[in-house]
Image: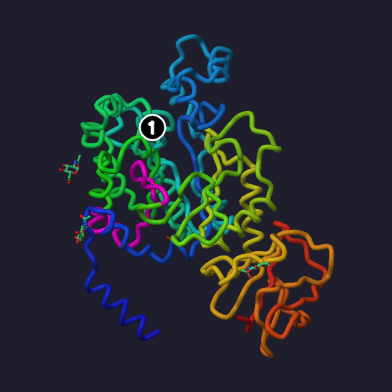
Amino acid sequence: MFLFLVAAALVGQTAARYTANWTSLDSRPLPSWYDEAKVGIFVHWGVFSAVGFKSEWFWWHWQGQDPPDISCELYMATNYRPGFSYAEFAPKFHAQFFNPEQWADIFKASGAKYVVLTAKHHEGFTTWGSPYSWNWNSVDNGPHRDLVGDLGEAVRNRSLHYGLYNSLYEWFHPLYLADKKNQFKTQQFVADKLLPELYNMVVRYRPELIWSDGDWEAPDTYWNSTEFLAWLYNDSPVKDTVVTNDRWGAGCACKHGGYYNCEDKYTPGELPKHKWEKCTSVDSLSWGYRWNMKLSELMDLPSIIKDLVRTVALGGNYLLNVGPTPDGMIPVVFEERLRGVGAWLEINGEAIYTSKPWRVQRENTTASIWYTSKGNTVYAIITTKLSKYTVQLLEPKTSVITKVTLLGDPKPLAWSPLSPSSGLSVLLPQLPYSPGEAWTLKLEGVQ
Ligand SMILES: *[C@@H]1O[C@H](CO)[C@@H](O)[C@H](O)[C@H]1NC(C)=O
Ligand SMILES: *[C@@H]1O[C@H](CO)[C@@H](O)[C@H](O)[C@H]1NC(C)=O
Ligand SMILES: *[C@@H]1O[C@H](CO)[C@@H](O)[C@H](O)[C@H]1NC(C)=O
Ligand SMILES: *[C@@H]1O[C@H](CO)[C@@H](O)[C@H](O)[C@H]1NC(C)=O
């Protein structure tokens, strides 16, 4: 501990400065809060929520891609007058029931340690009063409210970390389209819109996480990503705490930046070398709200818990998305899922928060048992209902001091070694009700 403090003091004194190149930026250690947190809530909210059809990509499917998506054209033709423009959806984004305290209570109850809100999705509408997004922001239009600021205050009041999602590109911004036409040899959009807005957002709201997106059409040199990140890490008000992802230009994903998202819903088969995050959505078909979602299209609680456990066992963080309604409600079915995750973490969180991947991540015989660890304590998380009252774990090496318990029940469990060198068989009690249908065995004194 003493050595650690000395080392920390030295690091503090010689606070590294980063240069605007990937070698330098990629060498920055990730602030520790992020890996310890493990679980976050993602919130996709914007004008697309007022459209409520198909997904947050509606505008692109309707008027961007060629040919357009027929279901979107039909939806507009059936429900809106001819000539109705996407911009006319903004006044329908009322947020009249938006109560940031209620949202923050739900997020807190989910057991998540951080919350990431869309400050600007690909449609370009900012959920804060950006001076660079004239009449296309939530203060001048729609809710007439600083959504980013109001949610941030409530979230931080509950000691949750606050992050902001920001799309680099905007599908239909005229300056972006002009730069694109010039094969990204000009940077008018970056100079006049993107960067001034991004700097302003960071200084105003001090996000501890910047979830960058919409980078893939142009190289990082077009976005001036390395220059922005050098400022963020060296001189911004969040230089010591901020965490970023890897979407900073074509080819950056899974390669450069802070932690790696790789692709949406990325699910590696084995332990990645670099810190990563799985983002996924309770509504399997959309990140934004849809009027016509069906129960069968949503992840149920056991599948969320399985996914979370697998992600954490493989060294990842789990960022679970919900799409609020345009009137500012978190659909109650999403709320129920989030509270369910929290109820499971209430009992099993010891195996999740601040854990480290173990030397083996999954039990070799059965795919349904995942390991996490904290020093000499190993957690075996059983994510399927067992038909027997014993469970065999082949990987842990036991000793005379080995003790086995079930999280949520302090009584030690009887166990016997499987072979002199490794493995044990544990006699289980009748398993208590688990909201996520997953149970954790805590193994102390094993290797
Ligand atoms: C990146 O910056 C570092 C530190 O300033 C410097 O030593 C290195 O040469 C640079 N690398 C490249 C590829 O420019
Ligand atoms: C949250 O707000 C309450 C009431 O204003 C205040 O007393 C408390 O200190 C705040 N907590 C945090 C962590 O900011
Ligand atoms: C982008 O970075 C280059 C190289 O550092 C710099 O000359 C230019 O001014 C930057 N552009 C903007 C818009 O910040
Ligand atoms: C899993 O089992 C296979 C077959 O018995 C073996 O070859 C492999 O080494 C085992 N893996 C681990 C991590 O023990």
Residue 94 picture location, percent across and down: 48, 30
Mark 1, residues whose alpha carbon is within 10 Å: few (<14), some, or many (≥20)? many
Query: Element under label 1?
Result: loop
**Residue designated by label 1:** 125
State yes or no: residue 365 in magenta.
no
Magenta-colored stretch includes residue 248: yes
Give the percent coordinates (x, y) of residue 314.
55, 61
Quarter of the picture for ligand 3?
Answer: top left
300 on left or right of 223: right
In the rendered image, the quadrant that contains the C terminus is: bottom right
- Please tell me which residue lies in front, 169 or 324: 169
- Count of labels in the image: 1
Q: Amino acid at mark 1?
A: Phe
Judge by depth and name the residue closer to the eye, 88 or 157.
88
| Magenta-highlighted residues | 230-254
Q: Quadrant of residue 296?
A: top right
Q: In the picture, residue 3 is in which quadrant?
A: bottom left
Residue 280 in the figure: left or right of residue 439: left
Residue 347 visible here: no
Q: Please tell me which residue lies in front, 360 or 89.
A: 360
Residue at image position (38%, 42%) is: 166
**Quarter occupied by the N terminus:** bottom left
Q: Position of residue 358 (x, y in %)?
A: 56, 71
Query: Above or below — where is 346 with respect to 86?
Result: below
**Ligand 3: does it lie within 8 Å of the C-beta at label 1?**
no
Answer left or right for 29 relative to 421: left
